Image (spheres, grey):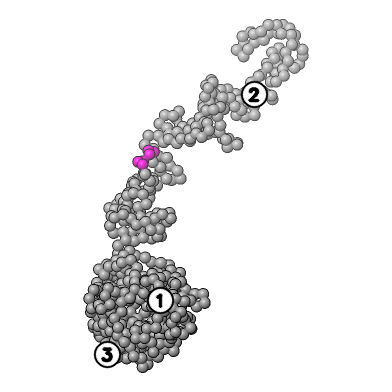
């Protein structure tokens, strides 16, 4: 500037038209001032230091395009409500949020022909992904179905990245009833009352298989199987049980020969079955049956030789431990005589055949000469009853009581002799009384009783008896009721009638006699 500005000062715009009112002072704080002659020009276009330039369009958001330039762009606009961005938005925190309780929706093209992702606002809300039209939801290369399948269907893949709902092959709802194991019935689940499983074994079988529709057995077994069960290899167990069976339906046997094996044809009986027929059996009485036949008392098991079955037969021709008939001598008796006394003579004994029918039990002491468990009680008969049917005899064995008197009844042996029976040895089995056993030892003292009543003595069984001269007498055993007798007594008896079992424990024995001819029957016992 070459000199001061002096009025009058005229101010014009770029077009030269006057503007403003008289101005005394002009200050230029940002821009260029040039003076040519009497004309001063102020340039405010920003060309000078400190000036900002730029331009934009309505609705565009202004932004600095340079350090001294503000501009706008059609890719960044604001209409007072919505902000439009032509590119993409970067978030330094990685978080995009709404300013209030509003759903966040992602879509394209203003929602026209666009799928959406909606993050629902609020606790427990969903994130919804909805493809556009026939499009799919593609997660990591797998295209998911856009519609729900039917109940119980499952997701399957086609192996090319597409998932779809499908019905399980052969599946469906369970069949049968509660506890029935499921099985494939023509492609569908089914159950049967013939195959059950119960996790609670306290009340019924845990697992059961059967071959009929009858009621299921509740036995508390871990496994219950009804019908034929085939086992290929070894099976280990603590106990194997089967139901009752017969010769035509064995309980245990080979798969290739199902009519041979072990059967249980009745309670407390076991059978060995061969070819559909009973071979060897043991019944509830411990009797041995051959071919379902127990034989008769005194018979022996006889071999039929090679290719022939064994059977019961009458003993004959000797070789027996206890011969069927003693003939005219008793010197061959191999087991201990019962009741004759410790020093009784038997080698040359004369024995008398006498019919016996009496309601009183005769009693003698006996010192055991064997140790073991009582097995058989036997006696020698000359002939059976003449008429009136069989006659029953009973032998009894008492323990000694106080002062060696007759004490508690230990056991009894019942023997039956049939009508018309021929001379033979007949036997019975000892049976222990309640609380007693059959064990005996050498040297133990017992009291033995003999009893056998019948109608008329003339029709009774004929027994062989020892005479008084061949048995031990007991001179010190005189009873109170027979104080006038001076003879040695041979046997004692109670005042009341009855068998040893009827007399029971501690019977009162008040009588004795001195019978000389039919003093005591030929009896003996055996032990095991």
Left or right: residue 152 versus residue 46 is left
Ranked by sequence position, the earlier of labels 1 and 3 is 3
Q: Quadrant of the N terminus?
A: top right
The residue closer to the viewer here, 308 or 88, is 308
For label 3, count other residues whose C-alpha is less than 10 Å away and answer few (under 14), some (14-19) or many (20+).
few
Ranked by sequence position, the earlier of labels 2 and 1 is 2
Disc ID at residue 126: none
Of badges 3 and 2, the one in the foreground is: 3
Disc ID at residue 317: 3
Please tell me whether residue 149 belongs to the stretch shown in magenta: yes
Residue with the mark numbered 1: 493
Could you tell me which secondary element the residue under label 1 belongs to? strand
Q: Residue at x 62, y 11 (%)?
A: 16
Of badges 2 and 1, the one in the foreground is: 1
Kindly report the secondary structure that dominates the magenta region of the rendered protein: loop
Q: Residue at x 34, y 90 (%)?
A: 350
Does any portion of residue 302 appear in the rendered image?
Answer: no
Quarter location, residue 18: top right
Does any portion of residue 346 appear in the rendered image?
Answer: yes
For label 2, count other residues whose C-alpha is less than 10 Å away and answer few (under 14), some (14-19) or many (20+).
some
Please tell me whether residue 372 belongs to the stretch shown in magenta: no
Point out the stretch of residues depicted in magenta.
146-151
Residue with the mark numbered 2: 52
Q: Position of residue 37 (x, y in %)?
A: 71, 14
The residue closer to the viewer here, 457 or 273, is 457
């Amino acid at each position: 500037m070459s000199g001061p500005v002096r009025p009058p000062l005229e101010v014009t715009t770029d077009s030269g038209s006057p503007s403003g009112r008289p101005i005394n002072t002009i200050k230029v704080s940002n821009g260029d001032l040039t003076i040519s002659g009497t004309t001063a020009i102020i340039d405010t276009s920003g060309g000078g230091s400190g000036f900002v330039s730029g331009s934009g369009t309505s609705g565009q958001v202004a932004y600095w395009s340079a350090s001294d330039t503000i501009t706008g762009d059609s890719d960044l606009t604001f209409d007072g409500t919505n902000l439009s961005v032509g590119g993409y938005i970067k978030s330094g925190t990685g978080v995009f949020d709404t300013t209030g309780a509003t759903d966040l929706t992602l879509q394209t093209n203003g929602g026209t022909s666009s799928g959406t992702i909606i993050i629902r606002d609020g606790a427990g809300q969903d994130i919804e992904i909805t493809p556009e039209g026939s499009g799919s939801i593609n997660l990591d290369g797998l295209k998911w179905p856009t519609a729900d399948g039917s109940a119980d269907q499952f997701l399957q893949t086609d192996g090319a990245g597409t998932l779809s709902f499908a019905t399980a092959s052969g599946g469906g709802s369970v069949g049968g009833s509660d506890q029935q194991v499921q099985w494939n019935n023509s492609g569908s689940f089914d159950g049967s009352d013939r195959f059950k499983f119960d996790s609670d074994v306290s009340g019924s079988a845990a697992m059961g298989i059967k071959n009929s529709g009858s009621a299921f057995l509740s036995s508390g077994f871990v496994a219950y199987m009804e019908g034929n069960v085939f086992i290929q290899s070894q099976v280990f167990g603590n106990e194997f049980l089967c139901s009752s069976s017969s010769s035509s339906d064995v309980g245990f046997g080979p798969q290739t020969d199902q009519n041979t094996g072990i059967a249980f044809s009745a309670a407390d009986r076991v059978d060995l079955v061969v070819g559909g027929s009973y071979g060897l059996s043991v019944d509830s009485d411990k009797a041995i049956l051959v071919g379902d036949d127990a034989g008769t008392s005194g018979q022996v098991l006889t071999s039929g030789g090679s290719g022939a079955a064994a059977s019961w037969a009458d003993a004959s021709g000797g070789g027996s431990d206890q011969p069927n008939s003693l003939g005219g001598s008793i010197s061959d008796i191999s087991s201990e005589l019962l009741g004759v006394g410790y020093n009784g003579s038997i080698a040359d004994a004369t024995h008398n055949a006498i019919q016996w029918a009496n309601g009183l039990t005769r009693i003698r002491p006996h010192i055991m000469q064997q140790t073991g468990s009582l097995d058989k009680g036997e006696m020698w008969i000359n002939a059976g009853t003449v008429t009136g049917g069989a006659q029953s005899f009973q032998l009894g064995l008492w323990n000694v009581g106080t002062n060696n008197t007759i004490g508690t009844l230990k056991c009894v042996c019942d023997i039956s002799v049939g009508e018309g029976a021929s001379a033979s040895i007949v036997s019975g089995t000892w049976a222990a009384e309640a609380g007693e056993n059959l064990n005996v030892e050498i040297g133990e003292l017992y009291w033995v009783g003999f009893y056998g009543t019948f109608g008329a003595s003339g029709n009774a069984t004929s027994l062989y008896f020892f005479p008084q001269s061949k048995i031990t007498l007991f001179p010190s055993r005189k009873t109170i009721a027979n104080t006038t007798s001076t003879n040695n007594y041979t046997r004692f008896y109670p005042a009341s009638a009855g068998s040893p079992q009827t007399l029971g424990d501690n019977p009162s024995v008040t009588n004795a006699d001195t019978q000389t001819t039919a003093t005591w029957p030929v009896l003996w016992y055996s032990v095991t």
